[in-house]
Amino acid sequence: MSVKSTAARSSRGGAKRRGAAGQVPELVQLLTPEGERVEHSEYSIDLSPEELRGLYRDMVLTRRFDAEAITLQRQGELGLWASLLGQEAAQIGSGRATRPDDYVFPTYREHGVAWTRGVDPLNLLGMFRGVNNGGWDPNTNNFQLYTIVIGSQTLHATGYAMGVAKDGADSAVIAYFGDGASSQGDVAEAFTFSAVYNAPVVFFCQNNQWAISEPTEKQTRVPLYQRAAGFGFPGVRVDGNDVLAVLAVTRAALERARSGGGPTLVEAFTYRMGAHTTSDDASRYRLDTERQEWEAKDPIARLKACLDNEKAADDAFYAEVEAESDALAKRVREGVRAMPDPDPMTIFDNVYADGHALVDEERAQFAAYRASFADTQEGAVR
């Protein structure tokens, strides 16, 4: 199966989404949905069986952790959760392409990238439970705190990358965002600054086809990666369900940034198989047949087929990974339930470094509001 023929069939809903020149955009792919290797003229990768097994392990553990988080939210243990189901290859492949001295700026869904940077999953869950403001020191793992404001992290990443360049450091920066965030002005500004200052940054767009309930075709008339050309730097579309292709493309983009080549836009063409968050109902705006089409391109099943085809893994390995995923789920489940309930009054802490009169007034009003419920309960008892 050729790369271009696969690209033609990979557009959402079966439609062939064409670029500015009327051509179906090329999709960099090294592994077909059936787990067969394919060649690409610009990108290639040579991994040992052990490295292939490592990528599979990463994706399985990340998916299991993600599923456990959804269950915990449904049980009332978390306030919210943004699932990465279906995007494991995009996150693990790009995360494993980074070096320890590279710096990562995530959104709020990069649980797989966090895993590759050594961030404990319990810290992620603590934030969504409301007991911490992130739970990890960004400079320990070179992994910035999650960003809820859509698209703002691309500017933060660009500014950091400009500083890296001025310091003469041999490292790169990578910023994650989604197809919906690509419509934000912050992203366009980040593109402009990074291009003009030749900043060592990679913009990694996970195009999962849906900005909450808004499909990609309602946001752009051209494939997202082609936007980079208008700002003066290269863009590339990669099969986001192909962990090998994502790893190869991201590694090349990061190396280009480190060597003074400037920014690159990587569009990982993937699919959000779950809801936008646990507060969303995806069945209200998309068809089940669409998800079924993408389930056939499942990134974990694809790599497993490759491992089986190449006899790079056996039943003992899969059983070991399954047991490890069970242990991770148990640790996460018990760890979250052992966390304290968040104190509602702490929402006013650390808004300003030195305090603020308006915040003090709001804190007092909220405290009085909460106290009013205690008075009502006391009256009811009497």
Image (cartoon, grey):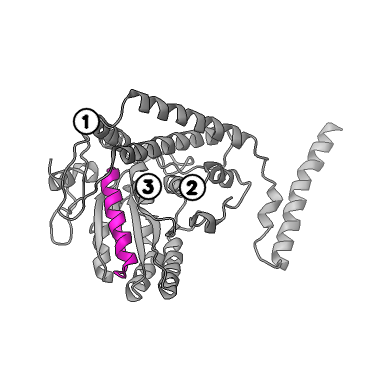
325 displayed left or right of 229: right
Frontmost of labels 3 and 2 is 2
256 is within the stretch colored magenta: yes
Is 194 located above or below residue 3 in the figure?
Answer: below
Provide the residue designation for mark 3.
91
| Residue 284 in the image, given as x and y percentages of width and height | 38, 39
Residue drawn at x 38%, y 64% as measured from the top left: 187
Viewer-side residue, 173 vs 267: 173
Quarter of the figure that contains the N terminus: top left
Residue farthest right in this picture: 382
Verify CB contact (< 8 Å) between mark 1 and mark 2: no
Q: Amino acid at mark 3?
A: Gln
SS type, badge 2: loop
Q: Amino acid at mark 2?
A: Gly
- Number of the label disc, if any, that sits on residue 309: 1
The answer to which of marks 3 and 1 sits earlier in the sequence is 3
Residue drawn at x 22%, y 37% as measured from the top left: 33
| Residue 188 in the image, given as x and y percentages of width and height | 35, 67
Q: How many marks?
A: 3
Verify CB contact (< 8 Å) between mark 3 and mark 2: no
The answer to which of marks 1 and 2 sits earlier in the sequence is 2
Provide the residue designation for mark 2.
118
SS type, badge 3: helix
Instruction: Quadrant for residue 30, please give it.
Output: top left
Is 16 located above or below residue 158 in the figure?
Answer: above
Viewer-side residue, 180 vs 88: 88
Frontmost of labels 3 and 1 is 1
Viewer-side residue, 225 vs 117: 117
> What range of the chain is rendered magenta?
241-266
Q: Amino acid at mark 1?
A: Asn
Cα distance between the residues tagged 3 and 1: 24 Å
